[in-house]
Image (cartoon, grey):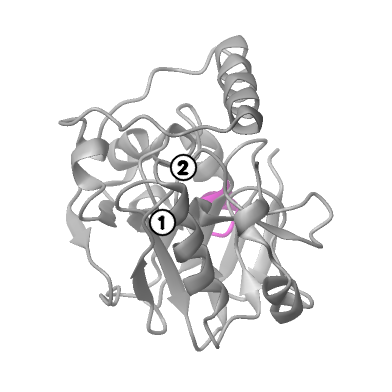
Amino acid sequence: MDTLTEITPTVWQLAFPVGHVYLAALPDDGYAVVDTGIPGSAPAVLDALARLGGRPDQLRQIVLTHYHVDHMGSAADLVAATGARVLAGALEAPYIRGSVPEPVPALSPAERSLHEGIMADFATAGMPPLRPVEVDVALHDGDTLDGWAEPVRVLHVPGHTPGGIALHLPESRLLFPGDIMGTSPDGTRVVLGPINVAREEAIASFRRLAALDAVDTVCVPHGVPLRTGTRAILAAATPETDWL
């Protein structure tokens, strides 16, 4: 059984080897997920929902931070099982819908080795093929998500992908950064997410997120969430030198 960890009274992390999924309780007895894991992860997400007391038809929103396979991988299966709406950045929508090919990332040697290893592991594990999915709500910088228990601000954070988004919950002081940020295995460092289409844009997006005032918890998709000493860890980050 995959590990389900409470982050706040209304947010939980479902940990996967690659690409964590976060579940959030909504005030209408519904739920949202932020990202969906690789293809084939839908049963684990639905099992986590059941452990929280939710039924499939209570999954209302699937928020995709970007189009990579470990984030949108199970969105189509979850839509089929639950009828949830898919929300994503407006510039990501063509890639998520499958109408435009993904741009090729600009990889350093360290990133190339990492990327090749991840893709080899996916192939060895027999990962199902990625299925595109319709985007029901195209999000823009400054939008606020409907239906959550508190204001959820959408931030356009390009660089990892052209139209990636982050979600900021100022009242909970919580941030979903997408792959702009990752953490070290021990959670003592925050690093620039690797495998970017535009490194300088990604660094600028990282700096924008790190400068947010109301952030004590960072729910990264890779690594462990930042929950202690977050401000100091963000201030000490050196994204300009990561992955070189």
Q: How many marks?
A: 2
Can residue 54 be seen in the rendering of this structure?
no
The x and y percentages for residue 63 are 36, 56
The amino acid on which the numbered mark 2 sits, given as a three-letter code, is Asn
At horizontal 53% and vertical 70% (from top left) the residue drawn is 207
Instruction: Decide which of 107, 149 is in the foreground and name it.
Output: 107
Instruction: Decide which of 199, 102 is in the foreground and name it.
Output: 199
Asked if the stretch drawn in magenta spans residue 161, the answer is: no
The amino acid on which the numbered mark 1 sits, given as a three-letter code, is Glu
Q: Label 1, on which residue?
A: 201
Q: Label 2, on which residue?
A: 196
The x and y percentages for residue 185 are 80, 49
At horizontal 66% and vertical 31% (from top left) the residue drawn is 110
Can residue 46 be seen in the rendering of this structure?
yes
Q: Which quarter of the rendered picture does the C terminus lie within?
A: top right
Give the structural element (helix, strand or loop) at label 1: helix
Tag 2: Cα neighbours inside 10 Å, few (<14), some, or many (≥20)? Answer: many
Look at the image and give the residue range highlighted in magenta.
Answer: 48-54
